[in-house]
Amino acid sequence: MRGITPCLWFDTEGEEAATFYSSVFPRSRITDVARYGSAGPRPEGMVMTVSFELDGLKFVALNGGPEFTFSEAVSFQVFCETQDEVDSYWSTLSEGGQEGPCGWLKDKFGLSWQIVPTRLTELLEDPDREKSQRVMAAMMEMRKIDVDALERAAAAA
């Protein structure tokens, strides 16, 4: 097997999206742009696919037409070590998009992301069930995840 590569279907914004995503994440780049030829089905010369890497992971953006759009049924998780990382990814990816609950957002292309501080996962996996449930309740009230607020919830008795 040669690996698995997510293919993201866009109407016409594939190159714009790949360029944007490549600017957001470290170790990211566009690796190839292919264009439609005379056989179609879209106009000759139009960008067909854009191959790109985000933090070393391979993706393809396909300009396939308006028939399909993104939904929350598929999202990408971005794990962050610090609140500053959470804040940066949240503000950059949600700009022109839509903030959702519990660390979820849709970017300006409609693609869903989960901005997750690693500390959230650690607190939710704490063997003290009451502590983890306080953290879960606090997280359920948030849009962008606030690590300090999670820590306060974990410490509450």
Image (cartoon, rainbow, N blue to C red):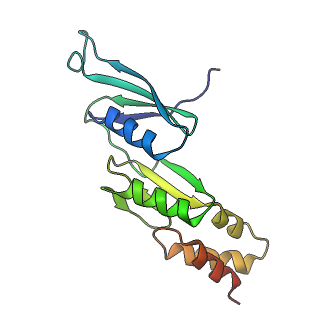
- The quarter in which the N terminus is drawn is top right
- The image shows a total of numbered marks equal to 0
Can you say whether 35 is above or below 8 in the image? above
Q: Give the quadrant of residue 45.
A: top left
Extreme right residue here? 127
Extreme top residue here? 38
Residue 134: x, y in percent? 64, 80
Indicate left or right for 46 with 53 as reference: left
Q: Residue at x 34, y 32 (%)?
A: 15
Residue 59: x, y in percent? 49, 32
Residue 47: x, y in percent? 29, 24
Q: Residue at x 57, y 60 (%)?
A: 116
Can you say whether 143 is above or below 8 in the image? below
Indicate left or right for 39 with 56 as reference: left
Residue 56: x, y in percent? 58, 35
Residue nearest the viewer, comparing 47 with 130: 47
- The quarter in which the C terminus is drawn is bottom right
Q: Residue at x 56, y 66 (%)?
A: 83
Indicate left or right for 26 with 125 as reference: left
Q: Give the quadrant of residue 50.
A: top left
Extreme bottom residue here? 157
Can you say whether 33 is above or below 155 in the image? above
Extreme left residue here? 43
Can you say whether 77 is above or below 56 in the image? below
Residue nearest the viewer, comparing 155 with 23: 23
Q: Residue at x 54, y 72 (%)?
A: 146
Residue nearest the viewer, comparing 95 with 59: 95
